[in-house]
Image: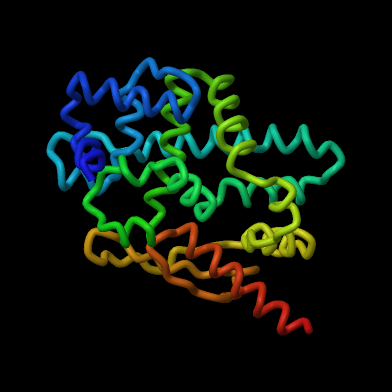
Amino acid sequence: MALKQFFSFLGNHSEKGDKKFKQWVKSITGYSPVNLSLYVQAFNHSSALRKNDSVKISNERLEFLGDAILGAIVADYLFNIFPLKDEGFLTQLRSKIVNGYSLKHLSLKFGFDIYLKGSLTKEEKLKSSAYGDAFEAFVGAVYLDLGYNKTKQFVIAKVINTHLDINSLVKTNEDFKSQLQIYCQKNKFNLEYRLVSEEKVGNQKLFAIQVFIDEKPYIRFESYSKKLAEQKAAQLTLQEINQSIG
C-alpha cells in the first residue's frame, strides 16, 4: 500500500522518488532511462489534468506515437519470422498482439496499474482503454528517450518473447475486426466503423460504434473504450453475416 501511495505522488519529483522510479523503468526495459520525465508523462491519464494541478501534460501524444512505433516493430518482427505468410495472416496476427485487450493485460503484467495517475476509479480504468493507452505511451517514451533500435529490442525481448505465445496466437482467431476486414476485402465491400454517439458518464465517455458495410447499417455496440466497441460490433456483425449465409 505504501508503494502505491508513494508512486501516486510522482509529480513531486523528489530525488529519492526519481531514483526508485528510474530503477523500475530500467527493470522493465532493460535500459537506464535518460529523460525520466518522458516516462512520468506516460502514466498521466487525461483525467489527471482535472484532478491534479501538478499534471500539465497527459500521455495522449505519447500514446499516439507509441501506437505507431509498436505497430511497426511487431509488423517487422512478424514479417521476418513468417516469410511465407500473406498480408492477411500478418495483419490479423499483428492485431492480436497490439489490440486494446492484449495491451491492457500486458500493462497489468508490467505493474502499470500501480503508477497510472488519473481520477478514474479502478473499475473505470479496467472498463476503459486507460491501461492499454498507458502501455502505448510507455513505448512512445522509450522511443523518444532511447531510439528505435533499443525500443525494438525492448519490445521483442521483454514483451513478445517473455509474455506472448506467438504459436498460440496463430491458433486462436479472436480479432474480429481483422476477420471482418478480410471478409469485406475479399468481397470488395466498403467497411466503416462510425461513432454514432458519445455520452459523458461520470469521468468517462461512453462511445457507441456502429458497423456499416457498403452504407448498410449493421450492429451497434456501446463501450467506454472505442477499440472494444469496434471489436464487439465486428464480432456481432460477423455472427449476423454467418447466420444470413448459413
Q: Position of residue 58 (x, y in %)?
A: 29, 38
Name of the residue lying farthest toward the top: 34
Viewer-closest of 129 and 112: 112
Percent position (x, y) of residue 188?
75, 62
Q: How is the image coloured?
A: rainbow
Q: Number of numbered discs present?
A: 0
Q: Is residue 174 left or right of residue 221?
A: right
The picture quadrant where one finds residue 127 is bottom left
63 relative to 195, above or below: above
x then y, percent, for residue 27: 44, 27
Return the x and y of residue 202 as percentages of the image width and height: 22, 64
**Quadrant into which the C terminus falls:** bottom right
Query: Which residue is situated farthest in the front direction here?
Result: 1
Q: Is residue 122 left or right of residue 32?
A: left
Judge by depth and name the residue closer to the eye, 238 or 162: 162
Q: Nearer the viewer, residue 193 or 141?
A: 141
Residue for point 60% across, 38% down: 162
**102 relative to 119 in the view: left or right:** right
Q: Residue at x 40, y 42 (%)?
A: 111
| Residue displayed at 55% across by 51% down | 99
Residue 21 drawn above or below residue 220: above
Outermost residue, left side: 53
